[in-house]
Amino acid sequence: FRLPSLWTAFVGFIFSSILLSGLILFLVTYAMISLGILAIPEKDPVYPVFPLIMLLALSTVIGSAISFVLGKQAFKPITDFSHAMTNVAKGDFSVKLSYDGRVQELNEMSSNFNAMVHDLGNIETLRSDFVVTVSHEFKTPLASIEGYATILQNPVLTAEETKEYTEKIIE
């Protein structure tokens, strides 16, 4: 299982944000303790720091889990688009994207992709029709030439008949 790099960057950004905010919270609290703004029991100077470390670890785990779930949902349209483009590259022009979300750019991308695939499908149909038509148009004269060439192989033809069939082939 390989994660997309954009998704990994998103999770890294969220993870870093949570870690940085936890670190800032820890430093502010420690500064408040050092300056005497926040009172701590004389007996246990480490006690107020331990809950902050736990808060930092908990916020990191929860933030990572939320980032994982939201990241998969946020990048699903991009993943679908990537799979659809792979199918189009393989020649499947029946692929359609359906995205009805709030992100205007993704709506436009989906619409433009569907229009592109539709046009590519039409071009493919025109190409196929062209090949069939050209193939048919070449077969008719080639069949006539083949028929006259077969007749010309007959040794009992007169010079006048040979000339006539040769002129038909040239025409």
Image (cartoon, rainbow, N blue to C red):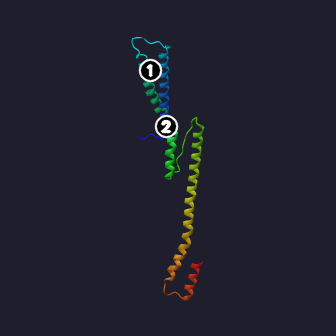
Disc 2 packing (10 Å; few <14; some 14–19; many ≥20): few
Q: Is residue 50 above or below residue 123?
A: above
Residue 33: x percent and y percent? 47, 16
Identify which residue, 162 or 118, lies in the foreground: 118
**Residue 102: percent from left, percent from top:** 58, 34
**Image quadrant assignment for residue 107:** top right
Q: Amino acid at mark 1?
A: Leu
Q: CA distance from mark 2 to mark 1?
A: 27 Å
Residue type, label 2: Ala
* 47 displayed left or right of 140: left
Q: Which residue is mark 1?
A: 52
Contact check, label 2 and label 1, Cβ < 8 Å: no
Q: Nearer the viewer, mark 2 or mark 1?
A: 1
- Which residue is at the far left? 43
Circle number at residue 9: 2
In this rendering, position of residue 170 left or right of residue 20: right
At a point 51% along the width and 81% down the height, the residue shown is 151
Tag 2 secondary structure: helix
Splitting the image into 4 quarters, where does residue 3 fall?
Answer: top left
**Number of marks in picture:** 2
Q: Which mark is residue 98?
A: none
- Determine crowd level at label 1: few under 14, some 14-19, many 20+ residues with C-alpha closer than 10 A: some
